[in-house]
Image (cartoon, helix red, strand yellow):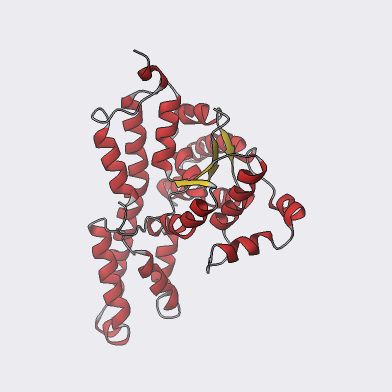
Amino acid sequence: MNSICCLLDACTVINLIHIDDNDFLLKKIKKLDVYINDSVFTEIRNNVYVKPWRELGSNHIDKAKREEIKKEIEQKLTFYRGKKNNNQDLLDDLGDDYFDRIKSLTNYTKRKNGELYSTGQALFLSRNNFKNVSFYTDDYPAKNDFADFFHDQQIGQIRDSVDFIILLYWLDENFTDDQLKNKLNELYSQYATEVVLLKKKLQKFRSEKIDAQFLKSKKEIALKLNELIRQLDIYEFNEIMEYYNFFVGKKSKCNDILNILQEYFSVFELDNNQKEDSLLIKIKKVSADIGKVKILKLNDLIN
């Protein structure tokens, strides 16, 4: 199994942590050749507690429950921490401008981030270790940004959390169809809950803050907000990042809205192009096909 080289992004690891009861998935992941960029691990550390703390709420916090959750997450983080690289080692070996060169080669116009650093690490792993690398991320815009580079350089593939869970499934003869469906449903819930919460917060802002005066002075912002809420209501994520970028550009006029969007940024990472389904639709389709479309394991090949 160690011949399967898996480079994990922050959103993938965070979701794996949140849906993994009793280390069911972690025990299987430990058998793989796993890598995490140290920039990505920083993102994981900064964001892995956002959902559980939000769910506990700020009032009447159950301290015992909080400590229980923290202990469980920290135990999982110990494994992932052991899989992170040191970007400085890459720079020492390949030159201080290595990631700048990757940025140029990929025509990446955004600031350097975990996905860019991971792409640079993936290229190094493929050349240095002579391995095909699968980079697992649920950030569909990032997938679109780097997919051509992965293909052209024959690094490997960019996949998502659904693909990673399916990989764990076919590698383990004891991983049942029901368990697969359960994990996919839990993954769906992670994202669907975020979509619903974001929509509710935006609706609350609209009902409380948008009045005649707001419409008069910030009509464009109000219209964009209405459009975004409609998109969320029908789970339409195609080009949804454009709404986020719009509010970033209007930050001085709508900082309160931008703060809400930033809290639920994972929703905007679901942005998909028209060539493929959104992650939520993919989860539904794969889950519905379990039992109809057989994912073959080794024992299934034996007559």
Work out whether residue 235 can be spotted.
Answer: yes
Q: Position of residue 103 (x, y in %)?
A: 59, 64
- Furthest-top residue in this view: 303
- The answer to whether residue 293 is left or right of residue 112 is left
User: From the viewer's perspective, is 80 left or right of 220?
Assistant: right
Dividing the picture into quadrants, the one containing residue 291 is top left
Which quarter of the picture shows residue 271? bottom left
Q: Position of residue 84 (x, y in %)?
A: 64, 43
Camera-side residue: 16 or 64?
A: 16
Residue drawn 32% across the image and 54% down it? 195
Can residue 207 be seen by looking at this rendering? Answer: no
Residue at position x 31%, y 32% from top? 181
Q: Is residue 73 above or below residue 95?
A: above
Q: Is residue 5 above or below residue 270?
A: above
Give the number of marks: 0
Q: Quadrant of the C terminus?
A: top left
User: Which part of the image, by quadrant, shows the N terminus?
Assistant: top right
271 vs 257, nearest the viewer = 271
**Residue 51 at x, y = what percent?**
44, 48
Residue 250 picture location, percent across and down: 42, 78
Of all residues, the one furthest to the right in this rendering is 92
Q: Residue at x 37, y 41 (%)?
A: 187
Q: Pick the residue in front: 59 or 83.
A: 83
